[in-house]
Amino acid sequence: MGDIKRKKKKYKKPKRPFDKQRIDEENVLAQKYGLKNKREIWRAESEVSKIRRRAKALIPKSDEERKEFFEKLNKQGFKVKETSDVLALTKEDWFKRRLQTIVFSKKLARTVKQARQLIVHKYVLVNGKAANSPGFMVSLELENKIEIKSQKQKPKKVEKIEKIKEGVVEKPGEGKGGDKVGKVKESEGVKNG
């Protein structure tokens, strides 16, 4: 069938691993967007750099190709009109289009961390399908189709709640079958006591 290809990294590690300023900036981003680890930040940097590289390669090309590229980015949710706008994109623009951030910004979750948990546990539906990846890039088309999965109640509990409201609930030991296990006659209680 073919050779199994080696899985490639989708990010590039920083050259200086212990740069204090970079670490502090990454910690602020991780806190703000509820990121699990630094790899998510590095992945966003590499994705944005790919977009920038593509925009630079399109500078000498025709206007039609550039417009097509800009339309594609606008569908993804990046507000881009010119090449300079593409070159000005940052990793924060990338984070704003993630499913986790959009669930939080739509007030479907109280915190960014809760939004991540809801997504990972498959409580968030995108276009009617469960999404379990917080890093899913949401296009403008799908942005309005995000919802929380409704919780189904067990039918037994619903019936029991309705009976309680009606006041028809039978106490334990007073069943139909003459269940007298829990009952003690007053006369027997007096003889033994």
Image: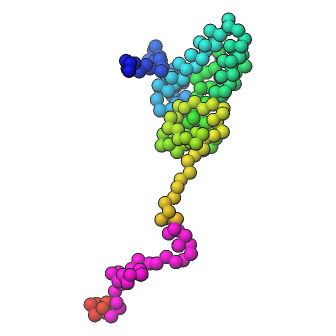
User: In the displayed image of the protein, which residue is found farthest to the front?
Assistant: 1
Residue 128 shows in the view:
yes
Badge count: 0
Task: State yes or no: residue 184 in magenta.
Answer: yes
**Residue occupying image coordinates x 64% and y 13%:** 55
**Residue occupying image coordinates x 50% and y 69%:** 160
Task: State yes or no: residue 156 in magenta.
Answer: no
**Residue occupying image coordinates x 35% and y 83%:** 180
Residue 115 shows in the view:
no
Q: Taking 86 as reference, is 162 above or below it?
A: below
**Residue occupying image coordinates x 65% and y 23%:** 73
Answer left or right for 71 relative to 133.
right
Main SS category, magenta section: loop
| Residue toward you, 170 or 17 | 170
Quarter placement of the C terminus: bottom left
| Residue toward you, 87 or 65 | 65
| Percent of width and height locating residue 57 | 62, 9
> How is this picture coloured?
rainbow
Quarter placement of the N terminus: top left
Q: Taking 148 as reference, is 43 above or below it?
A: above
| Percent of width and height locating residue 169 | 49, 76
User: In the displayed image of the protein, which residue is found farthest to the left?
Assistant: 192
| Residue toward you, 164 or 44 | 164
Q: Taking 192 as reference, is 109 above or below it?
A: above
| Percent of width and height locating residue 168 | 52, 78
Numbered range of the magenta stretch: 159-187
